[in-house]
Amino acid sequence: MIAKLTTGNGFGGAIRYDMKFGSDNSSMSVLLGLSGVDFSYDDEGNIKIDPRQIAFDFRQQALCYRTPDSDNARGVRKPVYHWVLSWRPGEHTTDAEKLDVAKDFMQRIGFVDTQYMISAHYDKAHEHLHIVANIVNNRGERIPTLGLIDKAHKAAAAITRERGYQWGEKATEKTIENAHRPHEKVRYIITPVVLKAVYKARSFDELKVSLKNKGIVMRIKTAQDGKRGGVSFACKYEGQVHTFSGSSLNRYLSYSKISAKFQRDRDKEAELAETTDFSTLDFRKLGQEAAEESINRRRNETWKPVKTEEDSKEPEDNLEDKNDTLDTVVDIASGLLGMVGSSGDESNSQDLRRKKKYNKRR
């Protein structure tokens, strides 16, 4: 037995598909169990449901979700959790056993105390059942989904072992457990990587190289007439190659959306080239003007020294310093006069000597 999960926003579509409403194969679907929704019984005692009413009940409970830090209900994104449990072709189980397996599976993965609808399908070679569950439980709380994919794969493998279901004609237990590896987990990992690469790229060739460096292979589907009409992304995870179409990852990753994005980028570049005549620009002159402007700006900046408290103080008068200064000036003047006198006439020098002798005698 293997388990597969899909999530979404609309309960009505999942319920109509599970019960095959409006389909010729409606007799190939059997309702096994309901919880938390309104239903009635027909004259024969069988459960009678209205898909619109059940979808309404699911939606009302999903809208009751509120964050722990807020008292206002805000709902939850993608409240529909649609599980599919499949047996090996040729393996048969009763409806009661299928219902028991479905409840056991939900208990193991933590989907308890919440709304659900369980139905069995017999329209394919292998028997399988569908579980539509609400991610918001009956208390208005969101069921934790951390590691949910791994829990589901382990639960399906454990149920297969415990109940003695067949692993397959050629498959071993290890092979089956590898088949339970989180395909959805890979989807969530590569989607933001591809979105970021598309945002930065300008062409499919550039996008292909960018994704290849990140371990993701991009392939463009080409029709017989040579026209491109699709894109897919693949990566290897734990020994298995997981391939996704662009639109299945994100609606903005389809071939048409990516092509339109690249065309807008080219249009913007062309518009910029038309409005700017690069041939008339003198880049050397522009560089010189920028340098001159920087120099002139620096020259116009006036530098003002910072005055300290000592600089602002007036010098104090000091008589001793002034007297010493005067004596020095007098000595220098006398020396200069002596130099001038020595260079004069001899008569003047004799008179000076006489005066000195006279002064000594006195």
Image: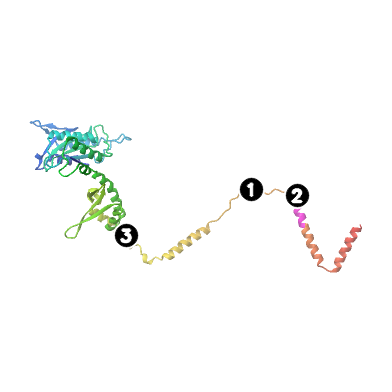
Measuring 13% from the left and 33% from the top, which residue is drawn there? 96
The image quadrant of residue 256 is bottom left
Q: Earlier in the sequence, mark 2 or mark 1?
A: 1
For the magenta stretch, what is the residue range?
323-329
Q: CA distance from mark 2 to mark 1?
A: 22 Å
Nearer to the camera, 362 or 129: 129
Inspect the image, locate mark 1, and give the three-letter code of the amino acid beneath it: Glu
The image quadrant of residue 24 is top left
The residue that label 3 is drawn on is 269
Q: Mark 2: which secondary structure?
A: helix
Instruction: For label 2, count other residues whose C-alpha is less than 10 Å away and answer few (under 14), some (14-19) or many (20+).
Output: few
Instruction: For label 3, count other residues whose C-alpha is less than 10 Å away and answer few (under 14), some (14-19) or many (20+).
Output: few
Q: Mark 1: which secondary structure?
A: helix
Q: Earlier in the sequence, mark 2 or mark 3?
A: 3
Instruction: For label 1, count other residues whose C-alpha is less than 10 Å away and answer few (under 14), some (14-19) or many (20+).
Output: few
- Residue 310 circle label: 1
Q: CA distance from mark 3 to mark 1?
A: 64 Å
Percent of width and height locating residue 190: 28, 48
Inspect the image, locate mark 2, and give the three-letter code of the amino acid beneath it: Glu
* Mark 2–mark 3 CB contact (< 8 Å): no
* Mark 2–mark 1 CB contact (< 8 Å): no
The quarter of the rendered structure image containing the N terminus is: top left
Nearer to the camera, 362 or 153: 153
Measuring 87% from the left and 66% from the top, which residue is drawn there? 350
Percent of width and height locating residue 3: 20, 40
Q: Would residue 263 be visible to someone looking at this image?
A: no
Q: Mark 3: which secondary structure?
A: helix
Percent of width and height locating residue 106: 21, 35
Q: Would residue 185 be visible to someone looking at this image?
A: yes
The residue that label 2 is drawn on is 320
